[in-house]
Image: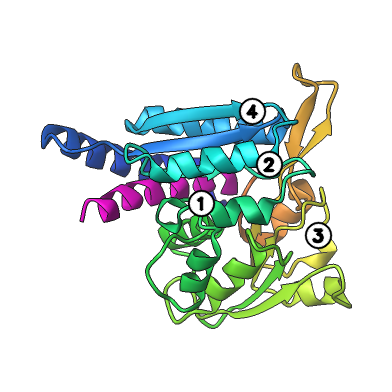
Amino acid sequence: MKLLDGKATAAQIQAELKEAVQARKTAGQKIPHLAAILVGNDGGSVSYVTSKVKACEAIGFESTLIRYDETVPEDILLEKVQRLNEDRSIDGFIVQLPLPKHIDELKITQAIDPKKDVDGFHPRNLGNMILNLPGFLPATPAGIMELLRRNNIETEGKNCVILGRSNIVGTPLSIMLARNTNPGNCTVTLAHSKTKNIKALCREADILIAAIGKPNFVTADMVKDGAVIIDVGTTRVEDSTRERGWRLVGDVKFDEVAEKTSYISPVPGGVGPMTIASLMMNTLKAMELKSK
């Protein structure tokens, strides 16, 4: 078993981005500027946004964090999105999901300028992805593809099962892995809550990607010997032995599954850092496209 160390791979990407930023500084060119809107105090969202701000600092990007109380009216949030669309100093921005129930996430996502949509969630960017046209790829699927590529994981001709069909991870990742690219050229099955015989299906997977948000869902009896396992899940569970009172758990029961695998990503330290690295890559790309 080898660990797919997303933290180490993301650090490599950040070093490359830092070098690119330094070159721009030396040439007197604009430095990428990422803005993030955070609504409420959801623990997972706060952690992710904080990590994104820290990544900007480490690379040398400018960053702006905009916070609202969870009771913020939808029209106020839409107005802020529009101001960020028009602000030429901002190269890309994100609205951290999930949002409170009284806010229509799709309406907010559609309001973002596709040229600044560095999370890759706007319908235009998703459409470009499907047609393999230029645009911003969703950060988590793109991060997983980069993790596979940089760790030389063979995907061509492999049977890949993805658990979870969300628009953020499962569905776009299924399209990316089926493409005639490297990584890619997989035979992909997109499984979900209505899929029958899901355990048997998983046992046939050369590459198994768990993205359903159910802690420890994937157990050893669901995994083929020598499979590659990517764990996208991050759920906070109570843990009185930790000072903070909780720990992060993935969708894969790591301790019993790991010994059966050829490669496995941990939680934390697997997909999470790669998502942030992809976001940073998209931000640099947004600024470069704007300056052309």
Q: Earlier in the sequence, mark 3 or mark 1?
A: 1
Q: Residue 115: x percent and y percent?
A: 40, 56
Question: Tag 3's secondary structure?
Answer: helix
Question: Tag 4's secondary structure?
Answer: strand
Q: Which residue is mark 3?
A: 220
Q: Which residues are magenta?
A: 267-292
> Is label 4 in contact with label 1 (beta carbons under 8 Å)?
no
Quadrant in which the N terminus is drawn? bottom right
Q: Earlier in the sequence, mark 4 or mark 1?
A: 4
Q: Mark 1: give few (<14), some (14-19) or many (20+) Cα within 10 Å.
A: many
> Is label 2 in contact with label 3 (beta carbons under 8 Å)?
no
Rendered residue at 81%/48% (across/down): 215
Q: Residue 3: x percent and y percent?
A: 57, 49
Question: Tag 2's secondary structure?
Answer: helix
Q: Which residue is mark 4?
A: 68
Q: Which residue is mark 2?
A: 74
Q: Mark 2: give few (<14), some (14-19) or many (20+) Cα within 10 Å.
A: some
Q: Earlier in the sequence, mark 2 or mark 4?
A: 4
From where the camera sits, is residue 140 visible?
A: no
